Every structure is written in C-alpha cells, then in structure tokens.
Image (cartoon, grey):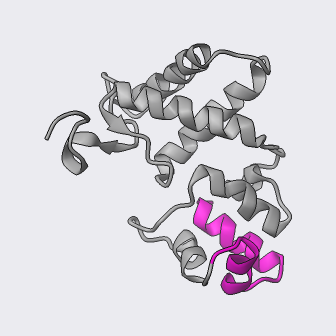
Amino acid sequence: MTFAQNLKRLRIAAGLTQEQLAHACGYSGQSRIGNYESSQPKARQPKPDELPMIASALGVSVGQLFGESQTLRLNPTMIAETVSALRIVYARRGVIFDAAGEADATIFIAAYRIRERMPRAISQADLVERVADVVSIKGAEDGRSDGVQVGGVDRGSTRKRAGKS
C-alpha cells in the first residue's frame, strides 16, 4: 500500500473528512490532505517534519502512515538533525534534499532510524557520515553507480549554484 492509500485508509478509520484532518493539522483547507491522498505521480507529499503532526491527528504512529506495523516514535530534535544531515549529504552531491519527495521520505526514515540508534550526544560530522552511507546504499539499490541522484532535485536545473549568477 502506498503512503497516499495508507493516509486515506487511516483518515477514514478515524472518522475524519479531509477538511477535518487538515484543520487538526493546522492547515487552512482540505486541498493539502487531498494532494497527499492523491495517487497521481506529481501529487504533493508531506515534508518529513509534517509527518508527526499528521500521525498525531490520526492517533497513529508515523510508521503506520507508511504501512508499518511497528511504532516509530519521532523525536523533534532528531528529526531536525536528520534533515540537516540529509541536506548536507545531498548538497555535497550537487542535489537538493526534497523533503516532499516520496523517494527522499523513504531515505529520511532510514536515516532517522540510524540516528535513533546512535548516542544522544553525537557530532554532526558523525551523523553526516552515517547518513551518507544510507544515501549511497539507496543509490546503489536504485541502480545508480554514482549514488548522486537518489531523490532530491538537481540543483543545476532548478536553481543557480551558490555564489554564481
């Protein structure tokens, strides 16, 4: 089952309309939830930092949003550390970490699980090194030999490189 299908199933099971779920998450209307539930390839996906809020509004774990049966309890500090590390790793590869992209959401979960198993006090450099391993492994699984474009957005096609006009 896809994220979109799980979200819709869980929302209906909770007895909520798209609009009710949107308001519970602090969104102004139902269109965002409608996009998240869409099966269209270009449909918008939630950012990793929105997942705990959506899960909480539905009374489920973040893992359940992705069809997992085990509970994944997210720590806001670890979310921020993981996203920061992913952005650094992707930037080194010349791409932008796309938190709304489905491929990058999958990588986020894998990277977050690694962060969870690490000591509370860890340097950003150590976390970046471990996250880089996850991104490289995922790139190899996707058939890329260079591990560059695992997800994310190619910087050259959407934004000017930093420091260049």
Residue pictured at 81% horizontal, 49% vertical: 69
Above/below status of 24 relative to 59: below
Side of 83 relative to 20 (left or right): left
Query: Which part of the image, by quadrant, shows the N terminus?
Result: bottom right
Above/below status of 49 relative to 94: below
Let me know if residue 21 is in the magenta part: yes
Residue pictured at 84% horizontal, 46% vertical: 71
Query: Which part of the image, by quadrant, shows the C terminus?
Result: top left
Quarter residue 5 falls in: bottom right
Front-most of 40 and 32?
Answer: 32
Task: Give percent across and percent down for residue 89.
Answer: 44, 26
Front-most of 2 and 131?
Answer: 131
Q: Residue furthest left?
A: 165
Side of 126 relative to 121 (left or right): left
Front-most of 40 and 115?
Answer: 115
Query: Which residues lie in the magenta part?
Result: 1-27
Could you tell me what secondary structure mostly forms the magenta stretch? helix
Quarter residue 60 falls in: bottom right
Residue pictured at 75% horizontal, 19% vertical: 118
Task: Give percent across and percent down for residue 90.
Answer: 40, 31
Above/below status of 7 relative to 91: below
Let me know if residue 12 is in the magenta part: yes
Task: Give percent across and percent down for residue 151.
Answer: 40, 42
Task: Give percent across and percent down for residue 116.
Answer: 76, 28
